[in-house]
Amino acid sequence: MGAEIEKTGAVDHGPGGAGGEVASALCNQSETGELSGSLELLVNKLDQINSTLVTIAPPDGVSVSQFGAAIFIAVIGAFTAYVFNFFHWRMVRKKHYFGRIADILNIHIHELERLAVRYWVSCYEEHEKQSIEIDEISIKAKLRLISRYTKKLGPLLDVSRYRELADELSSFSQDIFDEASGGDFESSRRKEDPKRAQIVSRLCADMQAKLVFLED
């Protein structure tokens, strides 16, 4: 009797939780505000430079047009360097952000593996009912968190370098759900199932090995 578990719920648990959505929104707002503020500051600085330059006479032997062209090239060079630097650090912050999500996801996968393997290598025992129910609740919570974080991390990896990993995350979320909560999960007739425990352990280990390359 398989468990009917809602893979995305309103209640979150563990690191990040519901705050993850808020953090993502604040991160986007912060980047937008930072870009707007930085560009406004740059425009003001260029205006100041322009006001100063109009009062400066070109050196002897240098025509006004030559002097203006040299100043224009210098300003364009400075602006290009600024833009490159801004987007470089923006990419660094984004890499750190999804590296942090990958780290949290890895923690939940590790904890799910520990819970699910222990659960499936033993059969249901009436005198262990309370402990078993706690494990079942914990397994469902971890599955819900893993589903949420794989959905959050996937879009951030939508580039050629990580496209394969993004697809594997989606498959992993479904596969681990089917294995960890399948069979006679939550049934008093449950028998030990070492094979299922091995499958769960292998799925978790494989995904952890791939996620470690995203961590900072």
Image: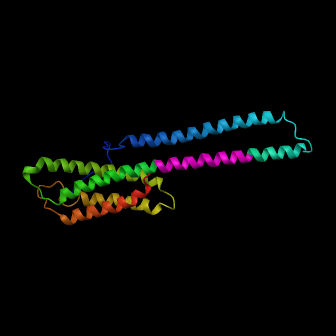
Identify the residue shown where x is 83% and y is 46%.
Answer: 69
Identify the residue shown where x is 23% and y is 48%.
Answer: 138
Q: How many marks?
A: 0
Does the magenta-highlighted stretch encompass residue 89? yes
Residue 6 visible at all: no
Q: Is residue 116 left or right of residue 65?
A: left
Does the magenta-highlighted stretch encompass residue 81? yes
Residue 8 visible at all: yes
**Spot occupied by residue 101 in the image (x, y as percentages of width and height):** 41, 49
Identify the residue shown where x is 7% and y is 50%.
Answer: 127
Q: Main secondary structure of the magenta part?
A: helix
**Spot occupied by residue 26 in the image (x, y as percentages of width and height):** 48, 39
Query: Which residue lies most toward the bottom here?
Result: 195
Q: Is residue 24 left or right of residue 8?
A: right
Coloured how?
A: rainbow
Q: Quadrant of the N terminus?
A: bottom left
Along the line of sight, which residue is nearer the eye, 173 or 211? 211
Identify the residue shown where x is 63% and y is 49%.
Answer: 84
**Spot occupied by residue 61 in the image (x, y as percentages of width and height):** 92, 44
Image quarter of residue 79:
top right
Query: Which residue lies most toward the left here?
Result: 127
Question: Vertical placement of 115 versus 202: above or below?
Answer: above
Q: Which residues are magenta?
A: 76-96
Q: Is residue 65 left or right of residue 101?
A: right
Along the line of sight, which residue is nearer the eye, 11 or 59? 59
Query: Which residue lies most toward the front here?
Result: 60
**Spot occupied by residue 45 in the image (x, y as percentages of width and height):** 71, 35
Image quarter of residue 68:
top right
Q: Is residue 84 left or right of residue 201?
A: right
